[in-house]
Amino acid sequence: MIKALLFDLGGVIVPLDFQQLKRNFATLSGRSIPELEVRLAATDLPVRYERGDLDSASFHAELSRTIGLDLDFPAFDRLWNSLFPPGTLLPESLFQTLKQTHRLILLSNTNELHFRHLRATLPHLSHFHGFVLSYEVRVMKPDPGIFARAIEAAGCAPEECFYIDDVEKYVEGARTAGIDAVRFESAEQVERELRKRGVL
């Protein structure tokens, strides 16, 4: 029996628009998107930030130096969060229903600025009982360590957890940890999978 429901964040609850983010960075830095991609490819800044190796102020400073960006921190915060277009992929009502009968855990590779923005603007997150965030636990999917932390937060056996992620290798990582998991396709598919498991 499923007792805990684990959800990824970006690409499952909220959409991501990487192309818009790149266009915004290109406009504000005065560099082309290919040049920005080359400069970023030579660093591991985004990964280090999501893994919690850098705080937000250091990430802002290092990324600005890398691509030649001249923005104060509040403006950079707004730019960094332009990754998220309006709207959501799953309705808030789903989480309002699920929290009544199951423990809800958010399991995400994310960073402080993105999560702080979404925590303030996304009502869905108020329905979760726990958060396992890469920048806080200092380990990223698909590392087994982050799934162990998620199982601990769920408070039940791995096989009593059901996880939804949009990245196949993360779904496979969860399955390796003993968690029932599927790759996200649509809100309708999520509801079908939940019904199959007797959750809805």
Image: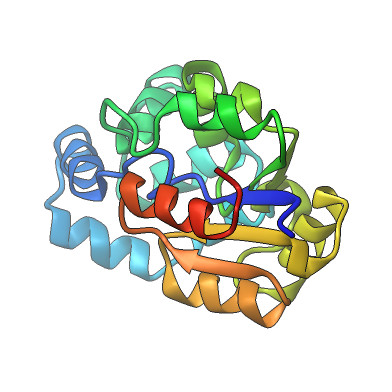
Residue 50 position in % (x across, y down): 58, 52
Residue 49 is at least partly visible in this image? no
Image quadrant in which you'd find residue 83: top left
The residue sitting at 25% across, 62% down in the picture is 37
Taking the image as shown, residue 40 lies to the left or right of residue 124, namely left
Residue 64 position in % (x across, y down): 40, 41
The residue sitting at 63% across, 51% down in the picture is 6
Relative to the observer, which residue lies in front, 200 or 56?
A: 200
The residue sitting at 61% across, 35% down in the picture is 98
Residue 64 is at least partly visible in this image? yes
Pick the quarter of the image with the C terminus: top right
Relative to the observer, which residue lies in front, 57 or 189?
A: 189
Is 81 drawn above or below residue 50 in the view shown?
A: above
Relative to the observer, which residue lies in front, 131 or 51?
A: 131
Taking the image as shown, residue 32 lies to the left or right of residue 37, namely left
Taking the image as shown, residue 31 lies to the left or right of residue 164, namely left
Pick the quarter of the image with the N terminus: bottom right
Image quadrant in which you'd find residue 53: bottom right
